[in-house]
Image (spheres, coloured by chain):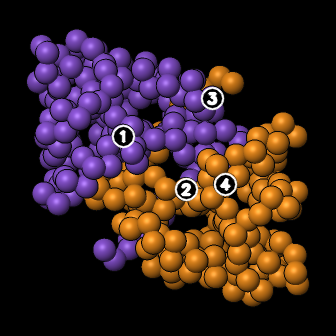
Chain colours: A orange, B purple
Amino acid sequence: MRIRAYERRDAKALVGLVRALARYEKLKPLAPAAARRLVRDAGRRFRVLMAEADGKPVGYAIYFLTYSTFLARPTLYLEDVFVHPDYRRLGLGRLFFAELRREARRERCGRMEWQVLDWNTPAQRFYRKLGAAPLEDWITYRLTLDA
Amino acid sequence: MRIRAYERRDAKALVGLVRALARYEKLKPLAPAAARRLVRDAGRRFRVLMAEADGKPVGYAIYFLTYSTFLARPTLYLEDVFVHPDYRRLGLGRLFFAELRREARRERCGRMEWQVLDWNTPAQRFYRKLGAAPLEDWITYRLTLDA
C-alpha cells in the first residue's frame, strides 16, 4: 500500500477513479471527450498522485498551486482526493495528506485548501482531525462560461 | 481610463493597492518581507492586470488558472479585484471583468471563480449582475501550515 507519482500508464485507471468520484458526489461523470482532455492535461495543468494497493491503482489526488496575496505565498489547492470504497479505512487518506503536506512544504506554501460537499460529514470529520477548519466568512462565486 | 497589463514599474503601486484592499477587508496588510515576495512572484506565480485613471494605477486584478476535473477544463480563478474607493462607480469593475472573461475564453476555461466576504453585499450584488452565482453546496476547508 503506497502513494506514488502518476505515470502515463495510469491514464485509464485515473479516468475510472475520476468517474467513480463523480458518482460518489452524485455529479455527472466525465464524457469521453472530457476524459481525453483530462488525460492530456494530467501533469501539465495539474499534478496527480496515485494510491496503490494490491499492486493496482485504487485512489488518486489531483492538486495544483494557487496563490494567497494575503500571505504572499503559494497555496496547495487540492482539487480531488478519492479512495475507492473497497479500499477505505486502510489509511490511504492519511497517506495522501501526509504526502501533500510534504509537497506543500517543499513549495513553501502557507496553506492547503480544498472544498467538500456540505452533506459529506465523514470527510469533514476526517479533515478536522487533520487540523483543517471550514472557512466561515467567505462565499465562493462562480461564473459559468459558454463552451 | 483603461485596463492594461502589469509592468515592473507598477510594483510599488501594486503593493499599495494590495494593502488598501486588506484594510477594506479588515484584514492585516502585507508586512515588508511579504510585499517583496509579492513583487517577486508577480507575473510568475500569478497574473496581474492594472486599472489606470488620470494616467495612474488605481486598481488591480490578480488571477491564475486552476482546473476543474468535473469539466476537464481550466478555471480562471480571480484571487483579488480591487478599485481604489476614490475611483469607484466609473465602470472599472466592469472593465476588469470584461477583460478577465476575454482571457478566460482565450484559455478555454469552463468557469471563472472567486471568493467574497459574506458582509460585502455591494460586491455580491455586482457579481450577481454579471451572471455569477454563489456556490451553495460546497464548503472550503483550509489547513494553515507553519512558515
Pointer 2 chain? A
* Residue placed under numbered mark 3 in the picture: B108
Amino acid at the residue labelled 1: Gly
Mark 2 Cα within 10 Å, few/some/many (few <14, many 20+)?
Answer: some
Find residue A50 and report its horizontal and vertical position in percent. 73, 70
* Residue placed under numbered mark 2 in the picture: A64
Amino acid at the residue labelled 2: Phe
Q: Toward the viewer: A9 or B48?
A: A9
Q: CA distance from mark 4 to mark 2?
A: 10 Å
Amino acid at the residue labelled 4: Gly
* Residue placed under numbered mark 1 in the picture: B43
Tell me which residue sits at (82%, 42%) in the image: A36
Q: Secondary structure at mark 2?
A: strand
* Above-or-below relation of B99 to A87: above
Pointer 1 chain? B
Pointer 3 chain? B
| Mark 4 vs 2: CB contact within 8 A | no
Which of the labelled discs sits on residue B144, or is there none?
A: none
Q: Are marks 1 and 4 on the same chain?
A: no
* Above-or-below relation of A68 to B100: below
Q: Toward the viewer: B121 or B2?
A: B2
Q: Toward the viewer: A121 or A77?
A: A77
Pointer 4 chain? A
Mark 4 Cα within 10 Å, few/some/many (few <14, many 20+)?
Answer: some
* Above-or-below relation of B145 to A23: below
Q: Secondary structure at mark 3?
A: loop
* Residue placed under numbered mark 4 in the picture: A43
User: Which tag is nearer the camera, tag 4 or tag 2?
Assistant: 4
Q: Are marks 3 and 4 on the same chain?
A: no
